[in-house]
Image (spheres, rainbow, N blue to C red):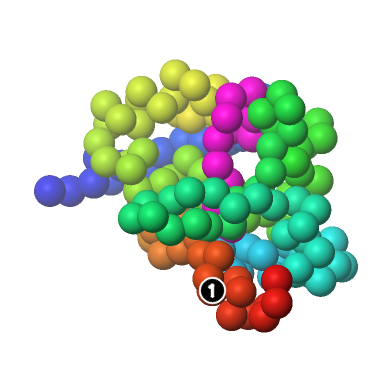
């Protein structure tokens, strides 16, 4: 079955912060995300985790790294815009071209009800959409046990 977006899709962030806060969400971090963000903030990855992260329950009984949220459910990196935009996690930089959102037109349009940037603004080619979707699906959250192997004693 061909993807529904064979003609491409439009999306341009409207900076409404709906995907960055207002309701509880998880921004899962991969090893790549952790290292990129800690370099961006010029701090050791362990210190980045201590200040900006939490451990979250994930599938099959695993515990993975996620960004903290503020008390209003905004991402800890959100302050009238993403403070770490050039280094933002892949989960964020691939939005809204997530595999499950691209399942079919109905799912895409249902998600667009909560995101004013979907179906408007910049046109994205089918190839770029597929690339971003693939990057999202290949970006595996960092498990606590793997973090402990990277940084023994933490």
Q: Main secondary structure of the magenta part?
A: loop
Look at the picture and state if 112 lies above or below 82: above
Image position, residue 96 (x, y; %): 48, 40
Check disc 1 and report its element: helix, strand or loop: helix
* Picture residue at 57% right of the left edge, 30% below the top: 24
* Picture residue at 55% right of the left edge, 22% below the top: 116
**On the rendered structure, is 112 left or right of 91?**
left
Q: Is residue 26 magenta?
A: yes
Q: Looking at the image, which is closer to me, 82 or 125?
A: 82
| Residue that mark 1 sits on | 146
Image position, residue 54 (x, y; %): 65, 50
* Picture residue at 69% right of the left edge, 37% below the top: 69
Residue range in magenta is: 18-29
For residue 137, say whether it is visible: yes
Q: How many marks?
A: 1
* Picture residue at 54% right of the left edge, 74% below the top: 146
**On the rendered structure, is 70 left or right of 143?**
right
Look at the picture and state if 142 lies above or below 112: below
Q: Is residue 57 magenta?
A: no
Image position, residue 136 (x, y; %): 45, 56
Q: Looking at the image, which is closer to me, 44 or 128?
A: 44
């Amino acid at each position: 079955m061909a993807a529904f977006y064979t003609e491409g899709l439009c999306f341009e962030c409207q900076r409404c912060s709906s995907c960055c806060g207002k309701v509880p969400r998880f921004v899962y971090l991969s090893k790549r995300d952790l290292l990129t963000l800690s370099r961006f903030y010029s701090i050791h990855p362990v210190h980045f985790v201590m200040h900006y992260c939490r451990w979250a329950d994930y599938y099959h009984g695993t515990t993975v790294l996620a960004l903290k949220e503020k008390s209003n459910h905004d991402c800890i990196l959100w302050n009238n815009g993403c403070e770490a935009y050039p280094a933002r996690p892949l989960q964020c930089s691939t939005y809204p071209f997530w595999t499950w959102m691209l399942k079919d037109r109905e799912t895409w349009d249902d998600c667009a009800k909560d995101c004013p940037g979907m179906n408007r603004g910049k046109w994205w080619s089918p190839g770029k959409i597929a690339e971003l979707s693939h990057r999202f699906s290949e970006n595996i959250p960092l498990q606590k046990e793997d973090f402990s192997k990277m940084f023994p004693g933490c």
